[in-house]
Image (cartoon, rainbow, N blue to C red):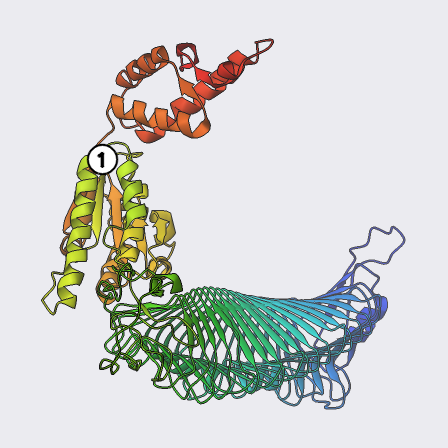
Amino acid sequence: MGEHRVRVTQDSASRWRRRNGEYETLHEALAAAEPGDTLTLRPGTFREPVLLDKAVTLVPADGPGTVRLDPPAGTALTVTAAATVHGLVVEGSDTAVPAVLLTGPGTTAELADCRVQTRAAVGVEVTGGARAVLRGCTVGNPAGLGLRVRGEAEARLRDCELTAAGQAGLAVLGGATAHLEDCRLHHASGAGLLLADQGSTAELTGCELYEIKGTGVQAEARAVGRLTDCTVHRVTGNGLTLDTEAELTLTGCRVHDLPENAADLRGRSRLVLRDSTLHDFGRGALSVWDNGTEVTATASRIHSATGEYPAAWVSDGARLALTDCALHDLPDALFVLDHGSAVTAEDCSFADIRSSAVSVSGGATADLTDCRIQQTGTGLWFRDHGSGGVLTRCEISDVSTGVIVTKGADPVLRECAVRGSSDAGVYVSAQGRGTFEDVRVSHGRGFGFHVIDGCRSLLLRCRAEQMGRAGFEFPEPGPVTEGCASDDVAPPPPLPAPFPGALAGPVPPNGLVPPSALAPPAGFAPPLGPVPPGGGVLPEPRTGLLTVPARLPAVPRGVPALPVGGGPIAPLPDCRPAEEALAELDALVGLAMVKREVRTLIDLISVGRRRQRAGLKAPSPRRHLVFTGSPGTGKTTVARLYGEILASLGVLQRGHLVEVARVDLVGEHIGSTAIRTAAAFERARGGVLFIDEAYALAPEDGGRDFGREAIDTLVKLMEDHRDEAVVIVAGYTAEMERFLAANPGLSSRFSRTVIFPDYSAPELLEIARAQCAEQEYALTPDAEEALLGHFAALDRGAGFGNGRTARQVFETMVERHAMRVAQLADPTTEDLQVLVPADLPG
């Protein structure tokens, strides 16, 4: 060791200490050093074990990597004090002990830019209550664990690499804590991260775990892990494995490229996913087992399975809760099995599912609210006795069969819609049951509601229209209906009078004739003779009564019998006038040209439907519109009413309005704009997507502006889903011309422009009058004259708000009225109501 030197620099301020010096060995230098000193090591290899039991600092003279600690046996580096080590290479080959040991309750060690490359039991061990910080370090140990933290110790790692471990890359055990930031764990065996024992906690931020022979993260025995913005990929086992009440929370993480499950949970463990993605997994994304085991996922994506297994498997009493999640490109999405197992999904989308989006069996339940299922084989399949759940406001489209209920399953569907099914929209067989409330099936190639085998399904206020076969098909008695309607049921003819004074005319809207209407007058005797053909046998309709043919007392031809077990299927009401929405449209002040345009469109659509029913070709009017005009001219209100009218005509499923602007569609980086635009369009499916100030998507100096991406995405969605939503774009006239020129496909899809003119002064006065009536105020004649002059004198520049201005003037008058009346000692009721010229804005 004579060629090596260690220089000890006196950093202490003590006046009685010895001078700085150089020493032949580290042992001598450490013996001479005092707390606070710095030991500078010249290049070379030190073969002696090093014990740092003082608050000293070790640094290599010529920079990181030039000094090696490599004793033949024992721990190469032991730290039991608040010591700091910079840039050393620690080796050693004693497989019975750690290469680096940081221990002791008072130890606050720091390792910076060090490389531990060893074949020991553990590369680095932090134990005994020690607190350690590792920055920019690399730990490799093919013979054992990479880094182990245990015994209530704490380790903080930043920009470190744990690689080539014969066992786990990082093990946190026995109540210890680890914090990792921007670290990489790879080429380990067993697990990249192992968490075990109650009180053990690991927090990883911006870390990557990959090339693991085993699982990426393994948590067990009540340990807790939190991963933020981390990636787990290219492992040979599961991405995440949880057991025995362990908990993991992933926020903004990615788990992908796995031959097994993205996450496997058992033994009452719990996984929370927030804004995370699971994709390219060989088995499932989520395999959830055992009573008490639970997964909660919010704003997360599951997609692109590489195997043929369900993406989520929930069994043996486990639970899965999904909120605002997207599942797509999968063989099956959710399989829920066994009594006590449950899945809840809210505001989720399921798309491109090759078999079933949701399968429920063995007494399990699935509750879905505001979910969208499209382009799947089967939307939902409730398979057997005890299986069920509640579906509320869900939309199922472009499927083979929307909902299947079999073998005693009994789900409840409320306010759901099935559109574009190639077979049945709803299919019930083999003692399946089910309650269907306000369910609508439309635009399918098969039956709407197909209930066979005498299943006792309950259908309340359900509706079928534009189906390739019957809207309601019930070959055997069993289903019970109330208030259901189908467009393949013709309105009944006027009733003949079977005797003097009897009811004649159309059948009432509910399809049932009150018994009083059928009662003959006193003294009336029916003619004797045989029953007229068909007069006493109830025919079995294609869509209609829910009974088998039965011999009933003879009733006159044309009088519908009262069915056993429910009411008849009624024809769809004639929605052509769409009375309420049209009345509200007509009540709007001004807008004569706008009302005429909207009525023309409605007439085209309505007559087209009547031509279709008559077997004639129907025109295909362009339903997408351009609204041009200044702010405050009623564009949003008219868009809302237009959607309601189209829904009443059966053109749209719901007719709801989704209003967006540039900020809702354009993202901050490449690719995010298409996602945002698609999400907005998805929310509007079945209704109207209203894009206000749409010209902002195509600025004059746009160049590479992401607004163009939103326009391109919108054009494709309008083509792919041409019958599923109406798009209305709105803005100033000149600017909207520039918008339509931004993409060659826009002008052909928006072939009709509706111009909203500014309100005149008399129309603004009418709006103010309406505001007064609504709020129980009154204008004096003088106030009306003054208000008309006020509106006529307004500057109609860029800031003019039209109807919004009228409302603002009214609100100002109400405030000034309150200030005036508050000065009166005993105001009358008239004082409290009447607005006078003095209340106008100054």
Residue at 38%, 68% (x, y): give it. 462
Total numbered circles: 1
Q: Relative to residue 322, is residue 726 drawn left or right?
A: left
Extreme residue toward the front, this view? 523
Which amino acid, mark 1?
Answer: Leu
Judge from the rendering whether residue 802 lies leftward or rightward of residue 73; answer left or right: left
Across and down, in percent, residue 296 comes to 58, 70
**Residue 125 image offset from top left, x and y in percent:** 73, 78
Residue drawn at 71 percent across, 75 percent down = 223
Please say if 16 is above or below 328.
Answer: above
Residue 182 in view here? no
Query: Horizontal placement of 422 versus 602: left or right?
Result: right
Is residue 246 placed above or below 483 in the rendered structure?
A: below
The answer to which image quadrant residue 400 occupies is bottom left
Residue 110 image position (x, y, % from top left): 71, 65
Residue 79 shows in the view = yes
Q: Which residue is mark 1?
A: 591
| Front position in the image: 104 or 451 | 451
Indicate the position of residue 588 as horizontal and vertical percent values: 29, 36
- Residue 527's quadrant in the figure? bottom left
Image quarter of the C terminus: top left
Image quadrant occupied by the N terminus? bottom right
Seen in the picture, residue 738 relative to 526 is either above or below; the reply is: above
Q: Residues within 10 Å of mark 1 (few under 14, many from 20)?
A: many
- Element on which disc 1 rests: loop
| 811 and 611: which is toward the camera | 611
Please state which of residues 187 and 97 is positioned toward the viewer in this rendering.
187
